[in-house]
Image (spheres, rainbow, N blue to C red):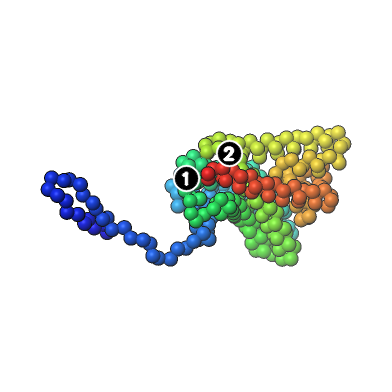
C-alpha cells in the first residue's frame, strides 16, 4: 500500500515530494515459455468463445455441433440397421463437411489476430519476454489445434459408433487413424492460410470475407475446371488442377496415400507420384504461411 511521506518545506512554499512506496518485484519470473503457453491456451479458448461473451460462443459452438450431428446420425443408422460398414469413410467426412470447416476458419482466424492488429497491442506482446516467433507459433498452434478438435471430434463419434455396432475393430481403427492424419494436415494448412489472410487487415469483417472468398472461389474454380477436363476426356490434367485449391489438395493427398476414395470427377485421383507432389505443395504452403506470418509481425512489432 502506498504511504505518503511529506517532506518539510519552508512556510509559503507549496512544493511537496511524495514517496509512494513502490518496491521491486522479488518473486519468481515464469519467463518466456510460460508466456508462450499462456498465449496459446488463451487463443485456443478464444477460438471456441471460452472466457468471452455468450455472443462469441454461439457461432463456434454451433459449427462444432453441425460437424458432429451428421456423424451421430450415421452411427445411429449403422447401429439400428446392423450395417456391415459405416455410410462414409473416415477420410471422406472432412471433404463432405468442407463448407462448415471453411466457415469456421473464416470466422476464427480474424478473431485470433485482428483485434491485436486493430488496437495496436502487438508491440506490447513483443516488449518482453515474448518474441515474434513465440507470438506466431502460439497463434498458429492454437488455431490449428482448434480446427483439429473441430474435424477430429466427428471422426471419434464415428469410431465409437462403429465399435458399438460391432464392426471389424482392425478395419475401423485403421480407417480412424488415416482420418486423423488427414484432418491434422488439413488443420495445419487451413489454419496457416486463414491466419495469413486475416493478418493482412485489422478489420475483422474484411478478414472473414477474404478467407471465405479465397477458400470458396478456389474450390469452385478448381471443381469447374476438373469437370471441364473430364468432359473433354483430358483425365490426365484433373489431378494437376487439384493442386490449386486447399480442399482438393487434401483430397489428393489422402486418396494417394491414405486409401481414400477421391472426390475428383470420375473418381480419378492422383497417382503415387502425383501424390508426392501434392504432399510437397501442402507442406510448402504450410511453411510459406508460417514465413509470411513471421514477416508480417516483424513489421507490426517495430
Residue 7 in the image: above or below residue 292: below
Closest to the observer, 196 or 217: 196
Residue nearest the observer in this picture, 186 or 298: 298
Q: Position of residue 120 (x, y in %)?
A: 48, 42
Residue 246 found in image quarter: top right
Report the side of 295 relative to 87 (left or right). left
Mark 2 lies on a secondary structure that is loop
Q: Residue at x 80, y 42 (%)?
A: 240
Question: Which residue in the protein does label 1 denote?
Answer: 121
Percent of width and height locating residue 93? 68, 50
Does dot 1 land on a helix, a strand or a loop? loop
State left or right for residue 235 relative to residue 215: right
Return the mark for residue 200.
2
Alpha-carbon span between mark 2 and mark 1: 16 Å
Q: Are marks 2 and 1 in contact (CB under 8 Å)?
A: no
The quarter of the image holding the N terminus is: bottom left
Is residue 41 visible in this depiction of the protein?
no
What residue is rendered at 70% in x and 39% in y?
219
Q: Which mark is residue 229?
A: none
Amino acid at each position: 500500500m502506498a504511504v505518503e511521506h511529506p517532506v518539510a518545506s519552508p512556510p509559503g512554499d507549496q512544493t511537496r515530494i511524495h514517496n509512494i512506496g513502490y518496491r521491486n518485484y522479488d518473486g519468481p519470473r515464469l519467463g518466456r515459455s510460460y508466456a508462450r503457453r499462456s498465449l496459446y491456451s488463451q487463443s485456443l479458448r478464444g477460438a471456441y468463445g471460452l472466457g468471452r461473451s455468450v455472443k462469441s460462443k454461439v457461432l463456434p459452438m454451433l459449427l462444432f455441433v453441425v460437424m458432429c450431428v451428421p456423424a451421430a446420425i450415421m452411427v445411429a443408422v449403422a447401429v439400428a440397421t446392423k450395417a456391415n460398414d459405416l455410410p462414409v469413410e473416415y477420410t471422406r467426412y472432412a471433404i463432405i463437411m468442407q463448407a462448415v470447416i471453411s466457415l469456421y476458419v473464416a470466422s476464427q482466424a480474424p478473431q485470433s489476430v485482428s483485434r491485436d492488429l486493430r488496437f495496436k497491442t502487438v508491440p506490447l506482446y513483443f516488449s518482453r519476454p515474448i518474441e515474434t516467433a513465440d507470438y506466431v507459433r502460439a497463434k498458429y498452434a492454437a488455431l490449428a489445434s482448434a480446427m483439429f478438435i473441430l474435424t477430429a471430434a466427428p471422426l471419434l463419434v464415428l469410431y465409437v459408433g462403429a465399435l458399438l455396432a460391432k464392426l471389424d475393430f482392425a478395419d475401423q481403427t485403421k480407417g480412424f487413424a488415416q482420418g486423423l492424419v488427414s484432418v491434422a494436415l488439413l488443420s495445419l494448412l487451413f489454419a496457416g492460410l486463414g491466419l495469413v489472410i486475416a493478418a493482412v487487415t485489422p478489420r475483422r469483417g474484411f478478414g472473414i470475407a477474404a478467407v471465405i472468398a479465397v477458400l470458396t472461389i478456389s474450390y469452385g474454380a478448381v471443381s469447374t475446371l476438373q469437370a471441364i477436363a473430364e468432359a473433354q476426356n483430358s483425365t490426365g490434367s484433373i489431378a494437376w488442377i487439384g493442386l490449386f485449391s486447399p480442399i482438393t489438395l487434401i483430397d489428393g493427398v489422402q486418396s494417394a496415400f491414405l486409401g481414400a476414395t477421391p472426390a475428383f470427377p470420375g473418381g480419378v485421383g492422383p497417382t503415387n507420384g502425383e501424390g508426392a507432389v501434392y504432399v510437397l505443395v501442402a507442406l510448402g504452403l504450410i511453411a510459406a504461411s508460417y514465413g509470411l506470418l513471421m514477416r508480417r509481425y516483424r513489421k507490426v512489432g517495430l
